[in-house]
Image (cartoon, helix red, strand yellow):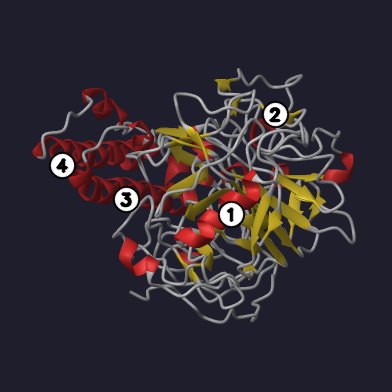
Amino acid sequence: MGRNTRKRRSSMATKAIAASAALALGGGGLIWANFYASAHESNNNGWSQNQTKAAAAQVATISCPDVGQKLTNVPQNARQGVATELANLDKQITEAYARLASTRQAQSGDPGFVQNAIVGPLKEKRAATIDRIRINIQRVGGQFNSSLSQLAACTTQNAQTNAGETGGQQQGGQQQGGQQQGGQQQGGQQQGGQQNGGQQQGGQQQGNGGQGGNGPVAADFVDITKVQGNAQLGVGQNGLPANGNSGSRGTFTTKCGTNGNDNHNTDNVIVAPGVANGAHHLHDYVGNQNNDAFASDQELAGASTSCQNQGDKSSYFWPVLRLQDGTQDFDQNNDGGGKEGNVGKILQPAQAQLKFVGNKKGNVVAMPTALRIITGDAKAFVNGNANANVNWSCTGFENKVQLKDKYPICPQGSQVVRTTNFQSCWDGQNIDSANHRTHVSFVQADGTCANGFKAIPQLQVRLVYNVPAPKLQNGTVVNPYAVDTFPENLHKPITDHNDFINFFSTNTMNKMVNCINTGKNCQ
């Protein structure tokens, strides 16, 4: 135990010397440039800090089918082996993206380079890994869906043609473009050929490629004062009231701090248990203080907590937000940090509000100990936004505008807000599922749970940040901010996500349920 990284952030800045090296990616118009370090500095993992890149490269990233999302029936005693192989798939994509980012000159001279030297070999590695997943499942008597073997091949993607942003903006507080709405999938068409919440500039995404060379770009940002209002008062996931005038109307708030003790790691004990750097990006942790890839349920239950209510040892974690202003942080040379394109100053939330609310149709039941819920999709830029669950806004605008595929530029005196409303229906049996999704779901349009699922308290996480407003200048963004991502997801705002593991004591959970069901506001 104890892999969690607690290192005081470094404020030292190697300030921008200039946007000295740039590469315009064909089609999408993504400009590759870096604003810090000298022209001679580089790391050993494929991301040159400021190297001159050749022009006319054709692709921005690599898009691979998400095998983990398709695994819905993995025997319990095969899950650790399968999780390890799924983490290997992520590592393979990360390494392939690093090669993509560091071979631009070769790509410009050989139109077949990406396919022959990067995508083709990646397919072979993925095929072997998927076969090991098959072996793990069949070894314990499970059934393997042979169609998963067809998911080995990956495609390339330019900066504009992405699955995750097309039509991903909310309308009337309800997301289109593949997000579930009242239990149904909406078609997700682009409005007038343009993305709401900020039009593409000149028909192309333009920007500087971020401090790490892999985003964000100018088209990822929008001045929130120029966005037409699209939010509804009091809405939760899918535009539905969190708890209406009937049903369970109480709340339970837990205060667990803002990660002032710098509890970070790049693991994900839910998705990649037992695998170091399984997330390939850095997480903030509040609540449980022993959460890393190797933590058992017993260790989590016995851990200390940052929550004021010591009956709450639950784990709450999300990707860090960084300011890419030319500064470095403690993980500049670490896996999951600067080595994988996650660079800049880590921003601690000014506020981290954790609140549980009820169901508008009826009572809620207690969550089981060790229940795991992930919401949103860290790979939504390449996966598409069927599982995206993102809300970006600014203080003073939350009841007017909620953004999905744009980072807001807030006016002076206003702060950036990330809000996440979790799934609040549970299958009544499982604390997790093979794809970490099917054991929980969002409520239906009428507020009820489908398929015999039970209503549980809905976790709502609201994170507020003091962020200097980025500036858009001539198609580039100066001093952008962004969430950490898998490197191939290019720091897109649609990839924001949140994780929760329930370790409330039985007494505290019962108090929560009673407060919510009787209409009280407790903490």
Residue at the (49%, 42%) spot, across then down: 379
Residue at the (23%, 36%) spot, across then down: 127
Disc 4: which residue: 136
Residue 432 vertical position relative to residue 339 in the rendered view, above or below: above
Alpha carbon separation for disc pair 2 and 3: 32 Å
Dot 2 falls on a residue whose secondary structure is: strand
Q: Give the mark, 1 or 2, whose residue is nearer the N terminus.
A: 2
Residue at the (57%, 78%) spot, across then down: 261
Q: Amino acid at mark 3?
A: Ala
Q: Where is residue 16, by image quadrant?
A: bottom right
Q: Give the mark, 2 or 3, whose residue is nearer the N terminus.
A: 3
Disc 1: which residue: 512
- The local crowd at label 4, few if under 14, some if 14 to 19, many if 20 or more residues have their Cα within 10 Å, is many
Mark 4, mark 3: which one is toward the viewer? Answer: 4
> Residue 87, labelled with which disc?
3
Alpha carbon separation for disc pair 4 and 2: 40 Å
Quadrant for the N terminus, please. bottom left
Q: Give the mark, 4 or 3, whose residue is nearer the N terminus.
A: 3
